[in-house]
Image (cartoon, grey):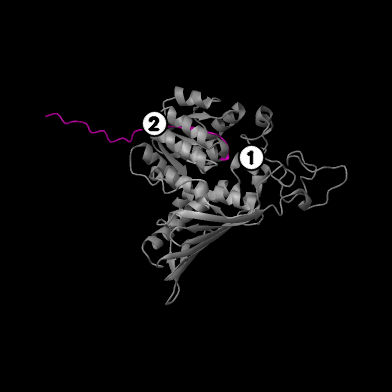
Amino acid sequence: MTTATIETSTPTVRVGIIGVGGRGVGCFGKLLKEHTGVQLTALADPNMPRLEGARETLGGSADLYTDVNAMLHETKLDGVVITTPDFTHADTVIAALRAGIKHVLVDKPLATTTQGCLEVVKAMEETGGQVAIGFNLRHAPLLARIKDILSNGDIGKLMLAENREFYNGGRTYMARWNRKYAWSGGLWIHKGSHDFDIFNWWNEDGIPTRVFASAGLNALRPDEIPFDVEEGKPVGPTCSECAYYDICPDRSDMGKSNLFNESTAAKDGYHKDLCIYTSDKDVHDNGIATVEYDNNVRISHMECFVSNFDDRSYTIVGDRGVLEAHLKDPTKVLFRPRWGEDKVIDVPQPREGGHGGADPSLVDNLVQAMRGENAKLSGVRDGIRAVAVGQAAEISWRENRAVDISELVDLHDPRLNI
């Protein structure tokens, strides 16, 4: 009797990365290369020296393309990861969908405006492709545990939530493309979309309706340089060229990697180590945003990019108790019931990897989705809600007024629940 052979091997998925900066290479590229059953097939970026540096960093023999459309149409891919500057996200996602790519993951934000998000929705409807957003914080064990606690009703009905984010590395935004509102949508979108998404996720029964934000550039500007500047001896323009490199407490070597260096800058004029004090910029280095929801919930998000430490600290208030947590200590949540004694809720130790193990989990789920398996990925519904809040916050602090989300988009539109 002949016995049929059963195929048990996992099919290999072919992935392309568009945009080979630090996130594209250091996070997604590295993790995909290490993932069983994944072939990193192609890399695309308009800067060939950077592409060559990316392939050297990652190893392997990925095809290199300076033309995104050429990569999308000439290479057989099961999915693409997009880590280009934020203002290009919507157009790049749409190009991938129209090229027939079925699985697209774009690092947050989905777009820099709600209009850009709506254009992605239209392309999805026309092509049938799937788009996921790189909201990696949803994969952080601490924040997922808080989600479970809220879903279980342990603190009663959610009333208030706040987080205070101190990001030492955020000052480097002023050295990079992120410093320009036109390129990033502003830091309430580029950075804040992470945090607004978490609040939207936790408050699953509510839709954001109104935003007020206040922000400013207090520290990272020319009149706040933290050392004496000699007459006739200017600061910058980059750290690698600066006459004060040896004494500046904020000096950076970001312009000395195989992705960003003199060779890559000669190709496109982009420097990653501009002086954070003297660079041209129109974003904030600190601010507070408050958001109202249609289910009588309010949240507050503070971000500060001039601290000497990194942390996100959370307070979540229900009508039956309060939760307190810190990403700096991701193994516990303090539960303070309205009636009774405080107790500590343990959280599993996060796995190794970026953002407290969240990045590897995000990539795991992306690979599962490309294989047709069940996966936990944020979708366009989540992406457009976070962008709507971030865009409203940008308008609010720049125009000094509260902004209704309905000015930007109708989040009750059933087409957006995808």
Q: Position of residue 29 (x, y in %)?
A: 50, 37
Q: Could you tell me which residue is drawn at 79 percent across and 45 percent down?
A: 244
Q: Is residue 378 left or right of residue 91?
A: left
Q: Is residue 284 left or right of residue 30?
A: right
Q: Could you tell me which residue is drawn at 71 percent across and 41 percent down?
A: 274
For residue 159, above or below residue 418: below
Q: Which residue is mark 1?
A: 177
Residue 208 seen anywhere in this rendered image of the structure: yes
Q: Nearer the viewer, residue 215 or 347?
A: 215
Q: Position of residue 39 (x, y in %)?
A: 43, 32
Q: Amino acid at mark 2?
A: Thr
Q: Secondary structure at mark 2?
A: helix
Q: Amino acid at mark 1?
A: Trp
- The C terminus lies in quadrant: top left
Q: Residue furthest front?
A: 407
Give the mark count.
2
Q: Which residue is mark 2?
A: 127
Q: Quadrant of residue 254?
A: top right
Mark linked to residue 112: none
Q: What range of the chain is rendered magenta?
A: 1-22
Q: Residue furthest right?
A: 231
Q: Secondary structure at mark 1?
A: helix
Mark 2 or mark 1: name the one nearer the start of the chain.
2
